[in-house]
Image (cartoon, grey):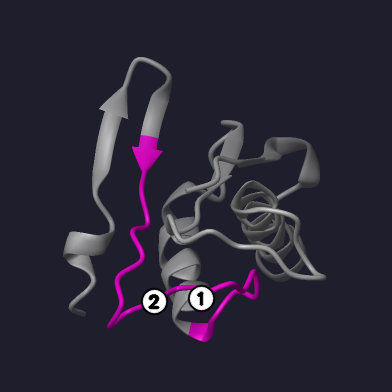
Amino acid sequence: AGLQDQIPITITNEGLLIEIIDKEKQAFFDVSSAKVKPIMRKVLEIIVKEIKDKPNQLTIGGHTDARPYHDDSFYSNWELSALRAINVVHFLQDQVGIPGDRLAACGYGP
């Protein structure tokens, strides 16, 4: 409830594009964090119910905000975005049961 504007679904030439858009009041990741928050897990579980048994490949793209980022954990926003995508892939594989050979992760940075 209240998340419809954060999850637009579009058919593209490459396939079905499901976007999960982070907003300040309903953030799916904390700032500068790659840990999947509980609200993101719930959203993923709802989406996966519809696509889990389909044979299609799934590419998970991670993004960050545009704030410059650098600390001991990540070199850049690009690496943070990649780790966010990887953590979602791990969740889909380990918690939801989507086979790893159907999943790919890609970081896009800010």
Dot label at residue 31? 1
Residue 106 locus on image (x, y percent): 64, 39
Asked if residue 52 is positioned above or below residue 106 in the image, the reply reads below
Judging depth in this view, the residue of 105 and 54 nearest the camera is: 105
Check disc 2: other Cα within 10 Å, few if <14, some if 14-19, many if 20+: some
Tell me, for residue 27, which label it has, or none: 2
110 sits left or right of 33 in the view: left
Disc 1 marks which amino acid? Val
- Is the Cβ of the residue at disc 2 closer than 8 Å to that at disc 1? yes
Q: Is residue 22 magenta?
A: yes
Where does the magenta region start and end?
Answer: 17-38
Q: Secondary structure at mark 2?
A: loop
Q: Amino acid at mark 2?
A: Ala
Magenta part, dominant SS: loop
Residue plotted at (82% across, 70% down):
72
Secondary structure at badge 1 equals loop
Residue occupying the far top of the picture: 13
Tell me where residue 48 appears, x and y as whole percent: 50, 58
Q: Quadrant of residue 88?
A: bottom right
- Asked if residue 36 is positioned above or below residue 108 in the image, the reply reads below
Near-viewer residue (74 or 99): 74
Q: Position of residue 85 (x, y in %)?
A: 63, 53
Alpha-carbon neighbours of circle 1 within 10 Å: few (<14), some, or many (≥20)? few
Q: Which mark is residue 98?
A: none
| Residue closest to the far right | 72
Eye-nearest disc, 2 or 1: 1
Please report the residue visible at 80 percent of the width from the left and 69 percent of the height from the top.
73
Camera-side residue: 98 or 13?
13
